[in-house]
Image (cartoon, helix red, strand yellow):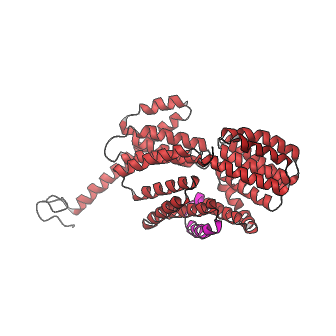
Amino acid sequence: MCGQVASGADRNGWSEGVTVDAFLERSAQESAELVARFCSERSAAAEIVQKIAPLTGAQRRLLLNNLPAKRRRAVCELLIERSRESRHHNARETLTYAELAVLVSQGIEGTHADEPRSRAWAELGNARRILADLAGAEQALDEAERLFDRGGADPLFQAELYSLRGSLAQYQRRFDLAFQLLHRSFRLFERHEDLNGATRALLKLALAHVYRGDPEEGLPHAERALALAAGSEDTRLKLYAFHNLVLILTEAGRVDEAAWHAHRVRPLFDAAGHRLDRLRFDWLTTRIGAELGVLEPAARAFDRLRKGYADEGMPFEAALVSLDLAAVYARLGERRKLRLLAQETQEILRSLGVGRDHLAALFLLARSEGAEAVRLVANLRKVVEGARDGRHS
């Protein structure tokens, strides 16, 4: 027979005569009630999120604005999850769900309300970054950090905030800040034994080196991340790790190695990659093919890719793919196609804020030969990237 508390109430708050068995039974019952309540809230939230799917934007906002307070936390969490899931197949949907999560989060009541609000704003910041709204991304992440500093407690979410802020700093070409934040994120994920979080932080560190122009410096981070990803059950994480390794090798000029790895992992992307995963990988492998001189298939693939990114509402990516296509047309001597492409691309570049003087360089491509065409494309690429992060008007 299990023992009893000796007298009165001990330091754990047990009353006299309460057996350990009775205490454990009551604890199990309370746990079961908590689980049941959680499942009920999730089920109700799922019904609400499913109900808004066919509605217009105004109808969604009206329904969510009128949610009872007791439903808001679970609905907010589910909208954040939907936003994250959409990152791999629909960038605009990512933004839509993040905006709705922020809307719902404003009405969350009770203690610890700041952390779910912070998570919603962080997701909005990342969605805006993906769609190249860097000023909007910074504003949203500022709000996420303010809310977390006021009422957040989860160290893993703090690590995620460092990671998101580091990704934004990389897009803004503030590389010293990006490295600082991503190292901080990695250490915090590692300290709390979050394998997937640590792996993603390393992969972002590797990418920051690529975009700073020293891809070889990023290779050790990518290789370490790939080794960590091998122990994860997250297929998307493995795809991300392989993609970054191939990208770094390509940017480092080790194109044959990149092609070998790309060929080896292509079946994994075909089987498990979502639409945006496949678009990015196809863009990368088409660049490799062009580098290796497989020009006509590369031209057809770039043409499909630029239309794919335009359909996804990602104009910067569409513009960059168009420049890759222009370089291939120049190498093939396809002057007529180059002129047509220049006409189509100028509208995209103008919408991105690229000035008239740079647009003129687009039409020079149609009259340029080999090396000169490559130089013009490289300069235009810098202009497009500058327009994205605000370095050029």
Magenta stretch bounds: 214-238
At horizontal 50% and vertical 54% (from top left) the residue drawn is: 165
Query: In the figure, is residue 298 to the left or right of 75?
Result: right
Q: Which x, y percent locates residue 361?
A: 77, 46
- Picture quarter with the C terminus: top right
Q: Quadrant of residue 224?
A: bottom right
Q: Which x, y percent locates residue 245?
A: 65, 65
At horizontal 69% and vertical 39% (from top left) the residue drawn is: 350
Q: Which x, y percent locates residue 9?
A: 14, 60
Of residues 389 and 72, the one nearer the viewer is 389
- The main secondary structure of the magenta stretch is helix
Where is 58 relative to 369, above or below? above
Q: Which x, y percent locates residue 80?
A: 49, 46
Of residues 197 and 13, the one nearer the viewer is 197
Of residues 3 and 116, the one nearer the viewer is 116
Residue 140 appears anywhere in the view: yes
**Can residue 371 be found in the magenta stretch?**
no
At horizontal 50% and vertical 39% (from top left) the residue drawn is: 99
